[in-house]
Image: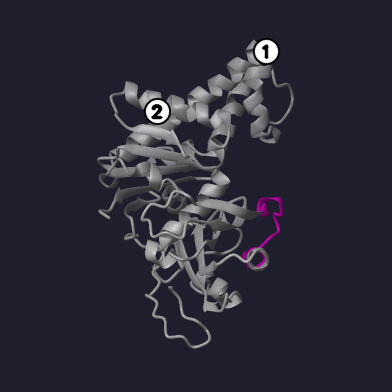
Amino acid sequence: MAGRKKTGAKTPTSKVVHGSDELPTVKVDKINLKIRDGHGFLGDRANSRAFIDILDDVRKQLRKHGGDPLGKRKTQKIKRRELDRMPIEGDVATVGLIFTAVEEFAQQLALVTRRFLKDKGWRGTQRIAVGGGMRDSRVGEWAIGRASALLKLDGISVDLIPIDRDPDEAGLIGSAYLWPPEALAGHEAMLAVDIGGSNVRAGILRMSRKREPYPKKIKVSRMELWRHADQPDIGRDQLVSKLVRMLRRLIDHAEDADLDLAPFIGVGCPGAIDPDGHISDGAQNLPGSWESKSFNLPERLAAEIPDIRGYDTEVRMHNDAVVQGLSQLPRMRGVRHWAVLTIGTGLGNAHFTNREI
């Protein structure tokens, strides 16, 4: 068993390295690739905000030439589920509006993907999993499918596929792959955290007790979600305190259910994660100063939750796109080089090479 028992048992543990390029089953080739053009970062053209801007612009153009089928409602107030129903329940004009926006977004997603594939770190890519909040909608799936077709029509033989997990769960499930299989062998559950620009999720992962490099039977048995974006005055420390309370409730639940909870907490967080757990860049969508040298989230969590079932708590943190991508490992066994795009508040991305097991 990994970790050191607080009762004095001398069980050795390896030095924890956060944001590592060398994970047990994959090599992380590139994280958060950023490419600029004359209009700014390319990734900003293919995130969830970009889709809303595209839809809003299409509506403005339609108003100049006869009317907007959605009336006076603000685009930002229209829920994604409503957009999903509109092509099915709406009239011809509404169908045209939605699919015009989807087509424009798909063009932008294909453009960004083409540019990423030209980067040295993305060469040889065979498959790209697309996740993030927008994937969890028919509108998002239509855009992914259309972008995939556009790439193939352009002679680029790369499969663009939606992640096969609920995006809310994928960002948690990938944490199980931050530890070597032998560390988790014998345990039936562990804690995972997914921190995003709008939400914070914490959950209990249930898994097989076998030592498998690509365990397939990982599921989220219990999850807590908090939408911090609805509280604009929330600060970093308040967010962390809320997260600690969420984790403690999950630990209590595991104890009540008599779950053999591993002394691990896996964390996916936006930004570039230094080996010591500091965030050096890319956390601008989180409330407060997450890139401060005086702030270290893994250390804070370990201090607040010093032990789990009598063993010292070990926290491992990695970039959130990496963690979401790791949830797709069982689907990537047939390829050597693959990547993930997460379409959310930003466009997260990571590229992987499978290691020989």
Q: Earlier in the sequence, mark 1 or mark 2?
A: 1
Relative to 348, residue 160 above or below = above
Q: Which element carries disc 2, helix, strand or loop?
A: helix
Asked whether disc 1 touches disc 2, contact meaning CB atoms under 8 Å apart, the reply is no
Q: Quadrant for the C terminus, please.
A: bottom left
* Residue range (magenta): 225-244
Residue 148, which numbered label?
2
- Taking the spot 48% from the left edge, 36% from the top edge, the residue there is 46
Res. 204 image quadrant: bottom right
Res. 224 image quadrant: bottom right
Residue that mark 1 sits on? 91
| Left or right placement of residue 281 versus residue 243 in this view | left
Residue 92 on image: x %, y %: 64, 11
Residue 303 on image: x %, y %: 57, 77
- Which kind of residue does numbered mark 1 sit on? Asp
- 328 falls in the magenta region: no
Residue 143, which numbered label?
none
- Taking the spot 40% from the left edge, 66% from the top edge, the residue there is 274
